[in-house]
C-alpha cells in the first residue's frame, strides 16, 4: 500500500453518508480532504468531524445536476491552488422505485445520468490530465451491485454507464501513474440505501479505501467491493 500522507482528495457527496465515511477514513491516513456538498452549509458536519485529524480540510459546493454548477465547483477546487491527487466520484441520486417499471419519466432518466454519469465525466476531465502530468492519481468511481431491478432502471443503467466509462478511460491511463477503478460500497443504511439495508454505513471502511491505496502499477479498470475487500491499515 502507498502512503497517502500529504495527498489531496476530492470526495463528491461527502457532506453525509458514504462520502463522509470516506473523508474520515482518508483523513485518518493523513490525507488532506476537500469536502463537497450541495451547499456550503451542508458541508459543516463533515468539517466538524474532521477537526480531530491533523490534516488540511477544505470545502466546495454545487449541485451536480447542473452543468453550470459543476463547472463552478471545478473552478472552486482550482481556486484552492492545490493538486487533486485522489478523486472519489461518490455522489449519486436514485429516482423513485416504480412497481410499474415502464413508468420512469424522461426526467428520471435525465436526472440520473446528469448526476451519476455526466458530472463524473466532467470531474474526471477536469482533474485526470493534471494527475497524468504529475505522474500520480487515483480515481474511484462508485458503482452499484444492483441488478434485475427494472423498477430502478434509471439508477441501474446509470451505474452500468459508470462501469463502461471507467473501463474505457482505464485504457488511456494504462501507461501512466494514474489508476481508475470502480467501487461498490455495498447495500448500506444511508439516505439512498434505506433503513432496511444489510450494513451500517460505517461498514464501508476500511475496504472503500483500497482503490486509493494501490501502487502505481496496481489494478486499473477493475472492480472493488468495499464490504468484501479485506484491508489491514492498522500499521
Image (cartoon, rainbow, N blue to C red):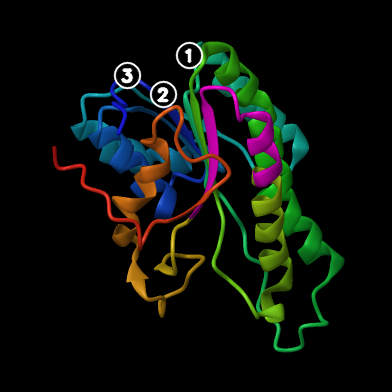
Q: Does 57 appear in magenta?
A: no
Q: What residue is drawn where x is 47% and y is 65%?
A: 191
CA–CA distance between discs 3 and 1? 11 Å
Residue 16, visible in the rendered structure? no
Q: Residue furthest bottom?
A: 99
Q: What residue is drawn where x is 46% and y is 44%?
A: 42
Dots 2 and 3: beta carbons under 8 Å? no
User: Between 31 and 53, which is closer to the camera in this rendering?
Assistant: 31
Res. 6 mark: 3
Q: In this rendering, is residue 151 above or below 18?
A: below
Across and down, in percent, residue 71 comes to: 71, 28
Task: Identify the element where label 2 is drawn.
Answer: strand
Question: Mark 2 or 1 closer to N-term?
Answer: 2
Q: What residue is drawn where x is 14% and y is 42%?
A: 234
Q: In this rendering, is residue 206 above or below 59?
A: below
Can you tell which quarter of the image residue 8 is in?
A: top left
What segment carries the magenta color?
167-183
Dots 2 and 1: beta carbons under 8 Å? yes
User: Between 181 and 199, which is closer to the camera in this rendering?
Assistant: 181
Across and down, in percent, residue 74 comes to: 63, 26
CA–CA distance between discs 2 and 1? 8 Å
- Tell me the residue that label 2 is attached to: 8
Res. 177 mark: none
Question: Mark 3 or 1 closer to N-term?
Answer: 3
- Tell me the residue that label 1 is attached to: 82
Q: In this rendering, is residue 211 above or below 103?
A: above
Q: Quadrant of the N terminus?
A: top left
Task: Identify the element where label 3 is drawn.
Answer: loop
Q: What residue is drawn where x is 48% and y is 20%?
A: 136
Amino acid at each position: 500500500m502507498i502512503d497517502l500522507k500529504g495527498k489531496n482528495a476530492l470526495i463528491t457527496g461527502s457532506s453525509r453518508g458514504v462520502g463522509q465515511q470516506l473523508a474520515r477514513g482518508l483523513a485518518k491516513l493523513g490525507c488532506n480532504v476537500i469536502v463537497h456538498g450541495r451547499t456550503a452549509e451542508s458541508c459543516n458536519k463533515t468539517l466538524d468531524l474532521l477537526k480531530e485529524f491533523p490534516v488540511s480540510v477544505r470545502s466546495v459546493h454545487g449541485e451536480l445536476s447542473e452543468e453550470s454548477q459543476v463547472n463552478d465547483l471545478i473552478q472552486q477546487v482550482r481556486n484552492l491552488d492545490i493538486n487533486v491527487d485522489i478523486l472519489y466520484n461518490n455522489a449519486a441520486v436514485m429516482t423513485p422505485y416504480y412497481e410499474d417499471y415502464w413508468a420512469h419519466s424522461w426526467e428520471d432518466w435525465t436526472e440520473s445520468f446528469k448526476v451519476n454519469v455526466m458530472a463524473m465525466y466532467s470531474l474526471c476531465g477536469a482533474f485526470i490530465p493534471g494527475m497524468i502530468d504529475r505522474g500520480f492519481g487515483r480515481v474511484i468511481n462508485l458503482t452499484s451491485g444492483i441488478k434485475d431491478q427494472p423498477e430502478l432502471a434509471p439508477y441501474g443503467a446509470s451505474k452500468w454507464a459508470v462501469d463502461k466509462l471507467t473501463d474505457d478511460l482505464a485504457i488511456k491511463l494504462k501507461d501512466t501513474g494514474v489508476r481508475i477503478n470502480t467501487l461498490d460500497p455495498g447495500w448500506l443504511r444511508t439516505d439512498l440505501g434505506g433503513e432496511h439495508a444489510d450494513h451500517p454505513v460505517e461498514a464501508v471502511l476500511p475496504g472503500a479505501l483500497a482503490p486509493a491505496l494501490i501502487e502505481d502499477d496496481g489494478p486499473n479498470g477493475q472492480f472493488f467491493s468495499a464490504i468484501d475487500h479485506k484491508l489491514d491499515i492498522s500499521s
